Amino acid sequence: MNPSQPAPEEAPSETATELVAYLDGELDADAHRAVEERLGRDEAYRLEMQHLQKAWDLLECLPRVTVGESFAATTVEMVAVNAEEELQQQKSKWPARRRRQWLLGSGGLLAAAAVGFAAAWLMLPNDNDELAEDLPVLEHLDAYQQIGDIESLRLIYEAGLFPDVPVSEAEEIELEDDETTESN
């Protein structure tokens, strides 16, 4: 223990607590009688009682301070002012809290919308891919509709009117299959 620091206060012993209650008149009749009996037979107990009695007597010598009627009123006013200040502090925080809630809510909605849009874009089929594959046919759709049927188109092709149009292997196989079925 550092000598410059004061010694910590010890909790009063059970004996001291009992004697203080005796001096204050807080004991019931049986406890009061037991303390008086012990005082009569126990020297250390009696000595502790004398020390406490001297302290009590010294307390009686201190001047008594009287408090005016305004003391209670000013104390209540101070409590009311402090409560009002706390309420004002809480109210001043409300707009910021409300703004933060709106921002978080709006941000959450925007994030949910972005996630929903991205999920729909990734999961739903894209019809534009199919249209892009059919683009060469769609560019000449009006002309193809004028031909009428596939047999007329085949005759034009065989006549060599489409010389610069390359025929893929799959189309050649299909044309050959069609010719064999027609001859049968």
Image (spheres, rainbow, N blue to C red):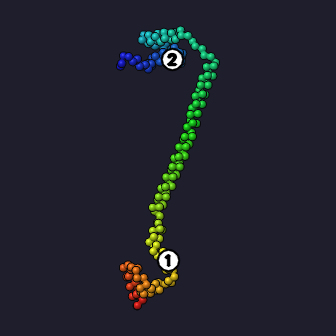
Residue located at (51% from left, 14% from top): 23
Q: Nearer the viewer, residue 80 or 155?
A: 155
Residue located at (49% from left, 11% from top): 55
Residue 65 image point, x, y percent: 58, 13
Up the image or down, 135 lies above or below 181; here it is: above
Residue 144 image point, x, y percent: 49, 80
Where is mark 1, residue-wise? 141
Foreground: disc 2 or disc 1: 1
Q: Count residues near mark 2 (Cα–Cα under 10 Å), then give few for <14, some for 14-19, many for 20+.
A: some
Residue located at (43% from left, 19% from top): 9
Q: Quadrant of the N terminus?
A: top left
Q: Quadrant of the C terminus?
A: bottom left
Residue 25 appears in the picture as rendered: yes
Total labels drawn: 2
Of the image marks 2 and 1, the number of the one nearer the N terminus: 2
Using the rendered view, name the quadrant where residue 12 is placed.
Answer: top left
Where is mark 2, residue-wise? 21
Q: Nearer the viewer, residue 8 or 83?
A: 83
Up the image or down, 128 lies above or below 40; here it is: below
Q: Residue type at mark 1?
A: Leu
